Image (cartoon, rainbow, N blue to C red):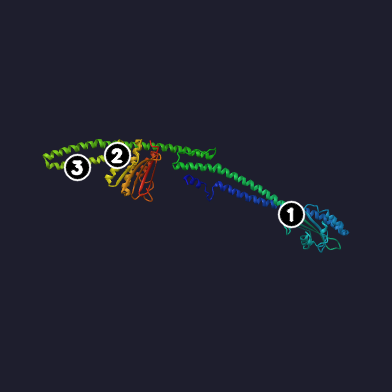
């Protein structure tokens, strides 16, 4: 998987705790649902209580009026008229049953004739009769039947002289009212939860697309700038604080880029000046002191010939002086070639690297080879100088630290890049190299960056150390 895909995957991966753009809407949604549930319970309780109060008020008023009516009919002993009177009340809202029972629980009259003559325990008023037998006064309470029907029970005692106590039993059915209360409460809760969910979704969309995505885009641009993959930061569109932050970052990166460009130009000028000075000193050593030492050597050689013929005893001293002068002249020439390699300026980079390999082999005893599959054309003087200095530093590092037996210098064009490689078969790099590397390594890396390329270091397939420099767009 490409590096960018891994980065995008890591960016979008779910973490814990989740980002604020997910956490805040989720918490608000949870709190909203809890609030909607509490509101549902409160509304349901209020509706049920209100309905119970309405029913009990109606039951008390109806029971008071029916008690007087029932007493009159019982005194007259006209049960048929009493049943007809109770039947007229069966259409009252919520009234399920109205019945008159005697002290033994026998239904004397009711709002429905099919309950007359039965025991109260066999009718919907069974619970009311049970409560009435346990009390002596008026009863008003709520109950639930086995089938889940919600009822309101009312029992009114009827006192008639010379007769035992009789009861007026009323049963009010609240099942439909309770069902409607539940449905209304659930509907209100559903609407409240839907509104809260849509609000949380909108909040998430604002946080995600309006803030988090734009901040992520800005963070990616800043990260790429910090890693050197871009030279500027694209501003984030909009008119809010995120846009202002991106503009501030963009101005900051522009200033950093300008300073980096000025620093690079200054460093390039310093390196060019130092290289010119090294070249001048090398030329002075080669053409000035070197030529003078050569003339002195020729004079001493002539003096040696004369002394050999006229004063042989002093000829040996002249020979020793000549030998010392030759060694000094060789050292001067070595210094001059190191400061200003003559093949680099006279014959090009390839000949200079070949000369470097030859000198390394002769001076160190370590086999050093130069490989260049095809002739490299049109290399600028500054590029050639930097590549030669990088190769020279890498070879010196291999001789000093790698304990190598063979060094290879390679130069070739590969995929539009000019590639310089220095391999050795030594001990390789340490497992934990010092942070930043040595001064020589940093100089090589700096020279590479000046040419707009990249430098890599590692181990070749056969082991050891490899320094590879890739320079694009060969000038």
Q: Quadrant of residue 323?
A: top left
* N-terminal-most mark, 3 or 2: 3
| Vertical arrangement, residue 127 with respect to residue 194, above or below | below
| Vertical arrangement, residue 110 with respect to residue 5, above or below | below
Q: Give the SS element for disc 1.
A: helix
Q: Which residue bears the numbered disc 3?
A: 323
Q: Position of residue 48 (x, y in %)?
A: 72, 53
Is residue 73 rendered to the left or right of residue 449?
right
In the image, 304 versus 144, the foreground residue is 304
Q: Give the SS element for disc 3.
A: helix
* N-terminal-most mark, 3 or 1: 1
Identity of the residue drawn at 65% across and 51% down: 37
Q: Disc 3 to disc 1, how far (Cα)?
A: 128 Å
**Neighbours of disc 3 within 10 Å: few (<14), some (14-19), many (20+):** some
Q: Position of residue 217 (x, y in %)?
A: 51, 42
Is residue 259 rendered to the left or right of residue 44?
left
* N-terminal-most mark, 2 or 1: 1
Identity of the residue drawn at 24% across and 41% down: 330
> Which label sits on residue 339?
2
**Neighbours of disc 1 within 10 Å: few (<14), some (14-19), many (20+):** some
Q: Position of residue 340 (x, y in %)?
A: 29, 38
Q: Quadrant of residue 160?
A: bottom right
Verify CB contact (< 8 Å) between mark 3 and mark 1.
no
Q: Is residue 335 in view? A: yes
Q: Which residue bears the numbered disc 1?
A: 175
- Taking the view exactly as shown, the residue that stands out farthest to the left is 310
**Neighbours of disc 2 within 10 Å: few (<14), some (14-19), many (20+):** some
Is residue 383 rendered to the left or right of residue 206?
left
User: In which quadrant is the C terminus drawn?
Assistant: top left
Q: Disc 2 to disc 1, how far (Cα)?
A: 108 Å
């Amino acid at each position: 998987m490409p590096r960018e895909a891994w980065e995008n995957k890591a960016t979008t991966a779910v973490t814990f705790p989740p980002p604020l753009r997910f956490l805040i809407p989720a918490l608000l949604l949870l709190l909203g649902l809890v609030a909607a549930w509490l509101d549902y319970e409160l509304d349901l309780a209020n509706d049920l209580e209100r309905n119970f109060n309405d029913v009990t008020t109606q039951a008390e008023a109806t029971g008071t009026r029916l008690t007087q009516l029932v007493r009159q009919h019982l005194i007259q002993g006209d049960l048929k008229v009493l049943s007809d009177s109770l039947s007229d009340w069966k259409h009252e809202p919520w009234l399920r049953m109205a019945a008159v029972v005697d002290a033994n629980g026998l239904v004397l009259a009711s709002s429905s004739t099919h309950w007359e003559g039965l025991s109260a325990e066999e009718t919907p008023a069974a619970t009311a009769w049970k409560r009435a037998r346990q009390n002596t006064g008026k009863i008003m309470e709520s109950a639930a039947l086995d089938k889940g029907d919600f009822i309101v029970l009312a029992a009114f005692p009827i006192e008639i002289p010379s007769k035992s106590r009789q009861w007026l039993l009323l049963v009010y059915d609240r099942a439909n009212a309770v069902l409607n209360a539940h449905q209304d409460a659930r509907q209100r809760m559903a609407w409240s939860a839907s509104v809260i969910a849509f609000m949380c979704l909108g909040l998430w969309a604002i946080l995600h697309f309006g803030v988090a995505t734009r901040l992520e885009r800005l963070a990616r641009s800043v990260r790429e700038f910090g890693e050197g993959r871009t030279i500027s930061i694209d501003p984030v569109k909009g008119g809010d604080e995120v846009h202002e932050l991106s503009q501030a970052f963009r101005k900051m990166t522009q200033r950093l880029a300008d300073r980096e460009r000025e620093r690079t130009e200054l460093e390039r000028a310093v390196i060019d000046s130092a290289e010119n000075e090294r070249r001048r000193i090398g030329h002075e050593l080669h053409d000035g002191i070197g030529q003078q030492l050569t003339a002195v050597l020729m004079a001493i050689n002539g003096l040696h010939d004369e002394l050999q013929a006229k004063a042989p005893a002093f000829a040996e001293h002249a020979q020793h002086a000549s030998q010392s002068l030759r060694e000094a002249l060789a050292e001067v020439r070595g210094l001059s070639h190191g400061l200003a390699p003559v093949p680099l300026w006279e014959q090009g980079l390839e000949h200079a690297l070949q000369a470097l390999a030859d000198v390394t082999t002769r001076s160190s005893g370590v086999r050093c080879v130069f490989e260049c599959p095809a002739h490299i054309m049109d290399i600028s003087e500054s590029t050639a100088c930097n590549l030669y200095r990088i190769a020279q530093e890498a070879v010196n590092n291999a001789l000093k630290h790698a304990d190598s037996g063979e060094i290879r210098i390679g130069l070739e064009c590969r995929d539009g890049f000019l590639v310089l490689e220095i391999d050795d078969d030594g001990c390789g790099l340490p497992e934990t190299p010092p942070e930043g590397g040595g001064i020589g390594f940093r100089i090589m890396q700096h020279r590479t960056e000046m040419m707009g390329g990249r430098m890599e270091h590692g181990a070749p397939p056969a082991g050891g150390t490899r320094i590879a420099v890739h320079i694009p767009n060969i000038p």
